[in-house]
Amino acid sequence: MQTDNECQQMVGSELFAWMRTIRQHLHQNPELAFQEFKTAAYVCEKLSELGIRSQPGMAGTGVLAEIGTAKNDRIVGLRADMDALPIKEKTGLPFASEIAGCMHACGHDGHMAMLLGAAALLGKMDLPGRVRFIFQPAEENGNGAEKMIEEGVADGLDAIFAGHIDTHYPTGSITVDEGIICAYADPFIIRLRGSSGHAARPHEAKDSIVAAAGLITALQSLVSREVDPNHAAVVTIGHVQAGETHNVIAEEAILEGTIRSTHPEARSRLLAGLERMVMGSSSLYAVTADLEFPDFLPAVINSASAAKVARKAAVAVTPEKSVFSQGPSSLGGEDFSFYLQKVNGCLVRFGAHVSADTGPAHSSTFDFDEAVLSTGAAWYARVAMEFLQESVSA
Ligand code: NI
């Protein structure tokens, strides 16, 4: 449980209860990437309760809203993601998902609730500029951020901020870092095609499964031999599909995986090494090989100036000892990186640890401490004010 602190006082019990109701409603009614129609309608309804006009339909299911004055021409963006995951929930919570095979297992329900809470707080303040609320679809799958940016949601922004719930850290804590905090992610698909035949007469066929097995094993040497050991990186094959039955040699094998890296040089070495090995397996096993990179995700690199503002806001809403660095970059991906390629900004993490029995993010038993809604709302509101005030005095 959260101890009494400044952000709880700033948010108050009434607003906390409002956010908790929102979080639980969204949790009960999750929607997958680019299908967040009911979610978007609900967000618009809550914004209108606050007297804020919203613009739905951004990148399909995203929602945009803006408040403030034109006292100065500064605009700060605050972003929350909206999508759930294709997971069957097993938390047993009274507000567990009512949608079969779909669950908010990454805290995006909480992100929307806390950003609405921040809108409530900021709506009552005299803003020295404008605040743009960005409710973005499809963070988990489909690079919703990229599509929102294509529709202009980042145009004119002077800075952008976001936070992600993280149950590794205690409730009330906020991690703030400058530089890289989430990795470059390069998902890939490999297709190996041989020719089918009888399991007992391999000399009449070209076995794609043997080629796939050899390639998967070979790929394990990429990180250890291509990357500076001081730079974190990983190559994972997460999905293999080949063959129909035990006595037929498989004509085609499809391997899906991802490369995660934290340094541009490591990334290019891994990409080149992967391509070399895939093409090499073609001549090694006499199959045809094809390599495709569907959705590249850039690394999340927080700018030093935005991280400074983020830290100032964090220290204002939670005790200074609860504001710390996450340490080395995560190897996870996060499409907030697309905004950061265009605008200065910073992504932080909000601690929300429940208990050792609660599953990690992206698991069927994931849950977070709802007290984080106060931390998040207070920080979002504060970081917007800090940025706008700083630009006024600059
Ligand atoms: Ni997430």
Image (tube, rainbow, N blue to C red):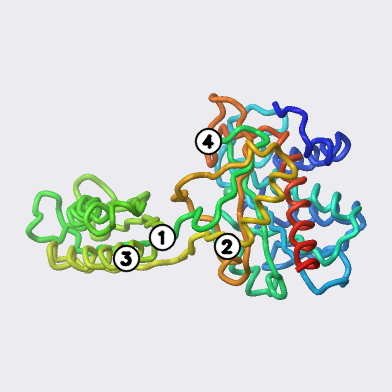
Q: Which residue is mark 4?
A: 360
Q: Work out whether 2 lies above or below 54.
A: above
Q: CA distance from mark 4 to mark 2?
A: 28 Å
The earlier-in-sequence mark between 2 and 3 is 3
Q: Which residue is mark 2?
A: 303
Q: Which numbered circle lies on residue 205?
A: none
Q: CA distance from mark 4 to mark 3?
A: 29 Å
Residue type marked 1: Pro
Residue type marked 2: Ser
Q: Residues within 10 Å of mark 3 (few under 14, many from 20)?
A: some
The earlier-in-sequence mark between 1 and 4 is 1
Residue type marked 4: Pro
Camera-nearest label, 1 or 2: 2
Image-based side of 34 in relation to 87, left or right? right
Marks 2/3 in contact by CB < 8 Å: the verdict is: no
Q: CA distance from mark 2 to mark 3?
A: 26 Å
Q: Work out whether 216 lies above or below 359.
A: below
Q: Residues within 10 Å of mark 1 (few under 14, many from 20)?
A: some
| Residue 73 figure quarter | bottom right
- Seen at 67% across and 74% down, the residue is 151
Residue 37 appears in the rendering? yes
Image-based side of 146 in relation to 319, left or right? left
The C terminus - image quarter:
bottom right
Q: Which residue is mark 3?
A: 271
| Residue 271 figure quarter | bottom left
> Disc 2 beta carbon < 8 A from ligand 1?
no
Marks 1/4 in contact by CB < 8 Å: the verdict is: no
Residue type marked 3: Leu
Q: CA distance from mark 1 to mark 2?
A: 25 Å
